[in-house]
Amino acid sequence: MKVDNWQGWEPEWLRLTEHFLSAPASPGAYIICANHEIRRAVGSDEHGILTIGESDNLRRRLAAFVRCARNPGASGHMAGWRFNYASFETVFPLDTLWVSWCPTFDKTSAYAKEGEMLALYLAQHFELPPLNYKFNWPKLEAAVL
């Protein structure tokens, strides 16, 4: 993903299943990636981004993703549920996924950071990451105005 501003993000990509509990229990945005590139509608995502999200508690949110991704029918994280339901594990084994997060001051800032990252992804690939199903349209419209 062509990102102009990685300021504030975890300096290294971390193995999701090994480090999700070390995420801060505070607001922020996060990105979960595969360990290889993914062909997109336009171009190829060299980072293999599967989902971009936000939360008022990064640790709890990432734990919910892992729980839903591991357990059929588990609820609490739609991207994790979709990962399990659509058998993403067959192409993107859960233990090979990477995560990075960007702590923010509050949930509103986390939502704005998620929207910024989704907008960058959408501008480059003309679609959202595979496990995302919503886009922060109001934040994008406010930024354009």
Image: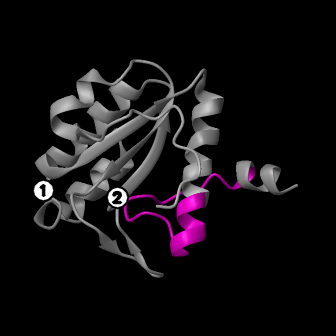
Q: Residue at x 79, y 56 (%)?
A: 141
Specify which label sits upstream in the sequence, 1 or 2.
Answer: 2
Residue closest to the eye, 60 or 126: 126
Q: Which residues are magenta?
A: 120-138
Whether residue 132 is in magenta: the answer is: yes
Is 6 placed above or below 81 here?
Answer: above
Q: What residue is shown with label 1?
A: 93
Q: Amino acid at mark 1?
A: Pro
Q: Amino acid at mark 2?
A: Leu
Q: Residue at x 51, y 24 (%)?
A: 27
Q: Secondary structure at mark 1?
A: loop
Is 20 placed above or below 97 here?
Answer: above
User: In the visual, does 122 lie left or right of 68?
Assistant: right
User: In the visual, does 2 lie left or right of 143?
Assistant: left
Residue closest to the eye, 62 or 82: 62
Q: What residue is shown with label 2?
A: 50
The answer to whether residue 18 is visible is yes
Q: Residues within 10 Å of mark 1 (few under 14, many from 20)?
A: few
Q: Residue at x 88, y 55 (%)?
A: 145
Q: Secondary structure at mark 2?
A: strand
Is 140 placed above or below 44 here?
Answer: above
User: In the visual, does 139 lie left or right of 97?
Assistant: right
